[in-house]
Image (cartoon, helix red, strand yellow):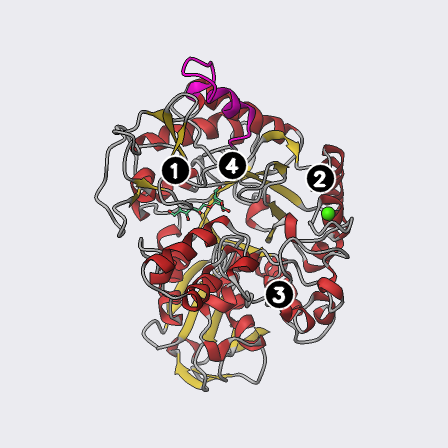
Amino acid sequence: MKHPWWKERVFYQIYPRSFQDSNGDGIGDIPGLISRLDYLQWLGIGAVWLCPVYDSPNDDMGYDIRDYRKIMSEFGTMEDFDRLLEEMHRRDIKLVMDLVVNHSSDENAWFVESRKSKDNPYRDYYIWRDGRGGKEPNNWSSFFTPSAWSYDAATEQWYLHLFGEKQPDLNWENPKLREEIYKMMNWWLDKGIAGFRVDAIMNIKKPLPFQDYPADREDGLCNVGGILGSQEGLRDFLNEMHEKTTKPHHAFSVGEVFGLDDSDISRFIGDDAYFTSIFDFRQNVAGQTMLGWYDWKAPTPDEYKECCFTSQKVSEGVGFFSNIIENHDEPRGVSHYLPEYAQNEKGKKLLGMMYFMLKGLPFIYQGQELGMENCAFPSIEAIDDVSSRDEYQRCLKVGLNEKEALKVVSHYSRDNGRTPFQWNDEKNGGFTTGTPWLMVNPQYKEINAASQIGREGSIYEFYKSMIALRRDDRYEDTIVYGVTEPVLEDQKDIMAYFRRGEKQDILVIGNFRDEAAEVEIPELKGKTCQVLLNNGGTCMAVDGRVKLEALQGVVFEVK
Ligand code: ISL
Ligand code: CA
């Protein structure tokens, strides 16, 4: 298929718990989301990735599923869900659901059975091992707790959980379990959803035997994330899942894939690959180490651009990455990638333009189109997220004081992306009439949708015009399908690239400096440069020289 729907649409990620509450209980819900679909339609959104709405005890906010075929009661009912799907389709918006099948909740009926006895028919749906002299079976660390193993007294064995204690890992080696998962996926696809965002999928294949690995942190534990993803047997599972679910349904899928070797991309994206697309996390993981958040650094604008360009290069001719600056697990992109002097409207639009015009599928995370920022959490108690609590303890363990630990966690906390959506400057930013489940970012008075919709020059209107440009038939061939060709790569804090199509060339150029810049692009000599998008200020492109103000970003059509 040369022009499938998913290449030409803009995606929007919704964290339903924090989008819109309809009944005053402080929790966003499906009726609330339905009441905001017009907002997405005005913006020009063509598909939504909806974070988990399945029945869950919410230890990891829905990423711990108790019942895969039931809607979380706080969010509504299956009737509400069906209405949501219908209302989205009426607005020509596709629905992509979250698929969490590396693990389930410990309250899932499968696990409730599994833990009962060693010969229970569901025992092998999960991963059980004997301990070593009263201790964990091996030194694997979990992403959310120190050890990846928890002891269960009923059968005197340990179960594996790469995430939280209440998120036991499913045993993909068991063909019966795999069939159950495929049946469940097909059940949702038959309902008419467009496909799945596939959670933590590189973790489903565990390396056997379950041995110790060299420690990568001070407590002797080892993060096996990377080791898991390179397991050859993982490919068989991914292929089988595709063959039995997404392929026969011609469904869309986007994998949450970390640590993939660039030489392997063609097996993951492209025609008949395991997934339609995978997220490009190269810039998100830049600056991260195994030690934990206290040791992480944000990339500079030049490191950011290098990551983007590498990803463009390795995916060209292979398939489409999904491009993001943030999601529900990340700090707000504008607070993470922009130097402090650039954390203003102009800088936010600049960053938005730089990633949005790259080749790939643009995903916008809720509130990104308003320039929502990280939240100044007043204390660790104000943070709810399970991984933030773990990282806070790690900070204290290595000797940071409480104030320093809070500073680290406030920057990286997943709750930065989860504070309620800022609809207006009224109580709780218009999110709820009750008490919000997580604090509203105090910035809602200044940063909110109502004040930006229709205001010329607002971040929201800027995103709207970027989306309109991408959807404009005259440019689609170049913006969606054109090759990316970086220029001025060695110019510090300048990010510039051509998109070359059959009908025209487009130049995307941005100045991340806090002063004006003038650069030379010989190819522009004798050509006219027509401005398609500009984040503000005057710009000149004359005789091969381009002048940009501080933090200016411009998209030119070059003729
Ligand atoms: O694997 C990682 C690093 O190699 C982690 O970053 C991990 O993949 C990531 O945290 C997975 O996130 C997803 O699954 C989690 C859930 O808490 C997140 O919200 C979700 O996006 C467990 O389901
Ligand atoms: Ca509610």
State which mark lies toward you, 1 or 3. 3
Residue on which disc 2 sits:
85
Q: Within the image, what quadrant is residue 517 found in?
A: bottom left
C-alpha separation, residue under disc 2 versus residue under disc 1: 30 Å
Q: What residue is rendered at 47% in x and 77% in y?
A: 340
Residue 556 seen in the current view:
no
Q: Which residues are magenta?
A: 106-124
Residue at position x 47%, y 27% in the image: 243
How many other residues sit within 10 Å of disc 3, few (<14), some (14-19) or many (≥20)? many
- Under 8 Å from ligand 2: the CB of mark 2? no
> How many angstroms separate mark 1 from mark 3 (CA)?
33 Å
The front one of 115 and 264 is 115
User: Which residue is label 4 attached to?
Assistant: 100
At label 3, which amino acid type do we have? Asn
SS of the residue under disc 2: helix
Is 434 or 539 nearer to us in this picture? Answer: 434
Residue at mark 1: C-beta within 8 A of ligand 1: yes
Where residue 426 appears, as percent x and y from the top left, is 76, 67
Q: Nearer the viewer, mark 4 or mark 3?
A: 3
Q: From the viewer's perspective, is the residue at label 3 or at label 2 nearer?
A: 3
> CB under 8 Å between callouts 1 and 3?
no
**Which of the marked residues, 1 or 3, is nearer the chain's N terminus?**
1
Q: Determine the CA span between mark 4 and mark 2.
A: 20 Å
Give residue 98's position: percent from left, percent from top.
Answer: 56, 40
From the viewer's perspective, is 83 left or right of 373? right
